[in-house]
Image: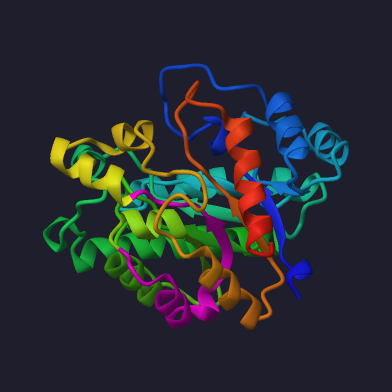
Amino acid sequence: MSATIKIANAPCSWGALEFELEGKSLGYTQVLDEMQETGYAGMELGDWGFMPTDPAALKQVIAQRSFELLGAFVPVALRHTNAHAAGIEQALKTAGLMHAAGFENAFIVLADENGSVDYRTNNAGRITTEAALSNAEMQVFAAGANAVALAVKDAYGMRTVFHHHCAGFVETPAEINTLLSMTDPNLLGLCFDTGHFSFGGGTNHVAFMQQHKSRIWHVHFKDFSPTVAAEAAAQQWNYFQSVANGVFCELGKGSVDFAAVKQLLLDWEYNGWIVVEQDVLPGMGNPKQCAENNRKYLHQIGL
């Protein structure tokens, strides 16, 4: 049954992030080559412009490696009504590229414009209920998410998942619950990220996943170091400092019980993809070695 679950990776594991950061990230050719060499079968697009934006060129570079393209990250400041139109435009542009390249089943991986609000960025992993959006503000946020998902579905028949993420306004389990309760379950799924769930205060991955089984359409495997998170709290590190110090560690070296999550997915007869992500900053560490170690760990637990 495990053969129904395929394993991918993402450009963020090589430091190609959606943020404007110092440091040089690697080019897509090297990233894709190293993904293939370390045993992955698919990828996500990365932020706009990292991969070719011409459909024929995009199709060619992915086909050269017999990869599948699973989705693309689209950040939108959804709490602002006046950002919704531009967010829809960006999502449609991204979906159109993937669709024209032949990847009609790829997801739009919608997220907040993470890292853009100082308080949320400076207190990632330490968010209290007082820092949450108000009910009215979350209604605006949810309406924007629904609007993006509807536009993508109407234009291309493609699905949208929301990626909860530290340093954004949907970080904690409570915030994820609220967003899901306010959005259309037929339009918007959840991209469940094990590492962001842990860093955002989640403790029982399996229970949370069981609660939202029908909404989990896409899965990211990311590990989390409680030791680094404790140091981040003691030193008052912001999100990027936490990432730079390894809060998202190699799979199997943190606190996430991946074997239990894997077993739950098998029990569900989940036949989608697992995308490995080990977020690093540009130029940080040895991404290829980490990718290889992460793939070996998944083999050890039967994936």
> Which picture quadrant has residue 134?
bottom left
Q: Is residue 82 left or right of residue 159?
A: left
Depth check: give the residue in front, 108 or 6.
6
Magenta stretch: includes residue 121:
no
**On screen, 144 above or below 76?**
below
Point out the image quarter for the N terminus. Answer: bottom right
Depth check: give the residue in front, 45 or 97.
45
The stretch in magenta equals: 202-225
The tally of labels here is 0
Q: Residue furthest front?
A: 300
Q: Residue at x 50, y 77 (%)?
A: 185
> Which picture quadrant has residue 145?
bottom left
User: At which x and y percent is residue 95?
Assistant: 66, 49
Q: Is residue 247 left or right of residue 210?
A: left
User: At which x and y percent is residue 248?
Assistant: 42, 44
Depth check: give the residue in front, 184 or 260.
260
Q: Is residue 205 left or right of residue 263?
A: left
Q: Residue at x 29, y 53 (%)?
A: 169
Depth check: give the residue in front, 141 or 268.
268
Q: Residue furthest left?
A: 130
User: At which x and y percent is residue 186?
Assistant: 55, 77
User: At which x and y percent is residue 283?
Assistant: 50, 21
Q: Residue furthest top?
A: 23
Point out the image quarter for the C terminus. Answer: bottom right
Coloration of the structure image: rainbow
Q: Can residue 125 be seen?
A: yes
Q: Can residue 47 be seen?
A: no
Q: Residue at x 22, y 66 (%)?
A: 136
